[in-house]
Image (cartoon, helix red, strand yellow):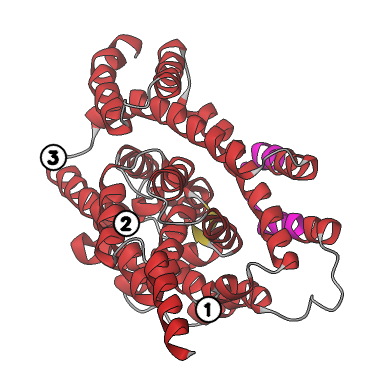
Amino acid sequence: MSEPKIRVDAQIQAKEAVYSLWQIILYFLKLGAIGFGGPVALTGYMYRDLVEKKAWISESDYKDGLALAQLAPGPLAAQLAIYLGYVQYRVLGATLAGFAFVIPSFLMVIILGWAYVAFGGLAWMQAVFYAVGASVIGIIAFSAFKLTTKTIGKDRLLWAIFLVAGLVTVITESENVLLFLGAGILYWLVKAPPKSFWKKTNLNSIAVLPLVSAFGIMSTTESSTLWRIFTFFAKAGTFVFGSGLAIVPFLYSGVVKEYGWLNAQQFVDAVAVAMITPGPVVITTGFIGYLVDGFTGASVAALATFFPCYLLTVIPAPFFKKYGKLPGINAFVNGVTAAATGAISGAVIVLGQRSIIDIPTALFAIITLALLWKSKKVSEPLIILVAAVVGILVYPLMH
C-alpha cells in the first residue's frame, strides 16, 4: 500500500516543480534589467509572464503575493518578486529572486551616479525623461487595465472596492494600508462570514513588526553619515506602502529638508534616474546614497530600503501559503487585492498628471498605449529607447 502512495506523491511533487530555481532567478534578473514602468507595470509583467505565459505561478499564489505586498510596507514590485520566489523554493528562492530583481537597476544607478558626479549634472536626462516619463504612463495604464480585468472579474462588490480605492489614491496621492485592510475585512464579512475564525493571526503581526523595528531604529544613536543613511532609509522602507509614488515625499522631507544631503534640483534628478532605469522605482535611494557617500553610501541606502520589506514578506509568507485557501482568508485576500488594484490604477492618474504636461507628452502616452493594445510583439524596452531618442530631439523645441 505504501509504494503507490509514494509514487503518487512523487508525481504530484514533479508536477508542482515546473521551473527550476535557476530559471526563476534568471527571470527576475531579466525583469530587473528591462522592466520599465514602475510597480504597476512590473506587477503586470509578472502576471503576464509567470501566470499567463509560463504558468509557473498559479492565479491564487499571485493574488496572495499581491495582497501580502500591499499589506506589508515596502516597494510593491520587489515584495511581489520576493514572494513569488518563495512559492516554490521558500527562503532561498525569496532571497535570490529579490536580489536578482534589484541588482541590475542598482548597478545602473551607480553608473549614472558616477556620471552625475564626474560631469556635473544630468541636463540631457531632462530631455530623455520628458518623453520616457510620458511613454511610461502608457505602459503602466495598459498594465493596470490587464491587471484589473484579470483580478476583479464581474463581482460588483469587488468593483465598488476597486473604485473607492482608486478615488482615494487620486484624491490623497498616497496609499493607506487601513484602506486595504478594511476592504479585505468587508469582503470577508460579506462573502464568508466567520464563525470562530478571526483570532489573533500573523496579520496582526504585519502591522506590529514595522512599528517595533522602526522605533528600535529611531532610538539608536546616529553617530556617522553611514549610520544616518542606514537609519533614514530603513525608516523609508519600513513606513512606506505600495510604490515609489509613496516614498518620494518621504524621501524629499528627509534628504532635502531634514539632513540637507541634496538640494531640490539634485533630488528631482534622482527621481528622474529612477524613472528612466528599469526595476523598482525606489532604487532612487541607491542614487541618493551615491551622491551622499559614494558606492558605500549607495550600497547602505539600498540595503536599508529593501531589507525591511524582505523580512516583512518572508516572515508572513508561510501563513499565506498554509491558510490562503480557507474561505475566510480567500475572501479577505480578494478584498485586499481589489483595493490594491484600485490603488494601482489610481496611481496611473496621479503619475500622469506629473508626466503629461503638453501635447507632445500626451501623444507619447497615447501612441505607447495604442502600440501595446494593438500589437503583442512590440516590447516595452524598445518603446522606451525610441521615446528617449525622440525626447532628445523634441524637448529643445518645447523649452
- SS class, disc 3: helix
Q: Label 3: which residue?
A: 119
Front residue of 58/196: it is 58
The reply, left or right, for residue 38 in relation to residue 331 is: left
- Determine whether the residue tagged by mark 1 lies in a helix, strand or loop: helix
Q: Which residues are magenta?
A: 166-184
Tell me: residue 13, above or below residue 349: below
The residues tagged by marks 3 and 2 sit, at their Cα atoms, a distance apart of 29 Å
Element type at marker 2? helix
Amino acid type indicated by mark 1: Ser
Residue 327 is tagged as: none
Q: Residues within 10 Å of mark 1 (few under 14, many from 20)?
A: some
Marks 3/2 in contact by CB < 8 Å: the verdict is: no
Query: Residue 152 occupies which quadrant of the picture?
Result: top right
- 54 on left or right of 197: left
- Residue behind mark 1: 213
Q: Is residue 84 above or below residue 271?
A: below
Q: Position of residue 252 (x, y in %)?
A: 46, 50
Disc 3 versus disc 2: nearer the observer: 2
Three-letter code for the amino acid on which mark 2 is drawn? Phe
